[in-house]
Image: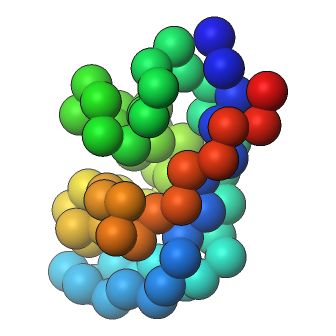
């Protein structure tokens, strides 16, 4: 498994949910890109756990809004 750092690249406000540039979560995943594979479930769960927001409902679950970097 690899550790990924997912960071919001730009502000997004939709459905009453605000994503702020710089919000970051760490995700452990066996996939190459946890945002685009397996429906992004690891990323959705991490944002829910850390910030209490549903990033999928906001429409921000995309590489347009999220930067993915492999940490380890």
Residue 58 percent location from the top left of the image: 26, 70
State whether residue 28 is above or below residue 49: above
Q: Position of residue 54 (x, y in %)?
A: 34, 58
Image point 66% across, 20% down: which residue? Answer: 2
Quick check: can you spot residue 15? yes
Left/right placement of residue 59 relative to residue 26 reads left
User: Which residue is situated farthest in the right direction here?
Assistant: 72
Residue at 47% from the left image edge and 26% from the top image edge: 32
**Looking at the image, which residue is at 46% across and 63% down?**
66
The one nearer the camera, 49 or 41, is 41
Q: Residue at x 53, y 76 (%)?
A: 9
In the rendered view of the protein, which quadrant contains the N terminus? top right
Image quadrant where one finds the C terminus: top right
Q: Is residue 12 above or below residue 26?
A: below
| Left or right: 69, with 35 as reference point | right
Q: In the drawing, does residue 26 fall left or right of residue 40?
A: right
- Tag count: 0
Residue 31 vertical position relative to residue 42 in the rendered view, above or below: above
């Amino acid at each position: 498994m690899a550790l990924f750092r997912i960071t919001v690249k730009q502000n997004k406000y939709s459905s009453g949910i605000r994503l702020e540039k710089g919000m970051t979560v760490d995700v452990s995943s066996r996939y190459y890109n946890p945002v685009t594979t397996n429906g992004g479930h690891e990323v959705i769960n991490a944002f829910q756990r850390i910030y209490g927001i549903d990033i999928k409902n906001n429409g921000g679950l995309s590489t347009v809004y999220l930067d993915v970097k492999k940490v380890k």
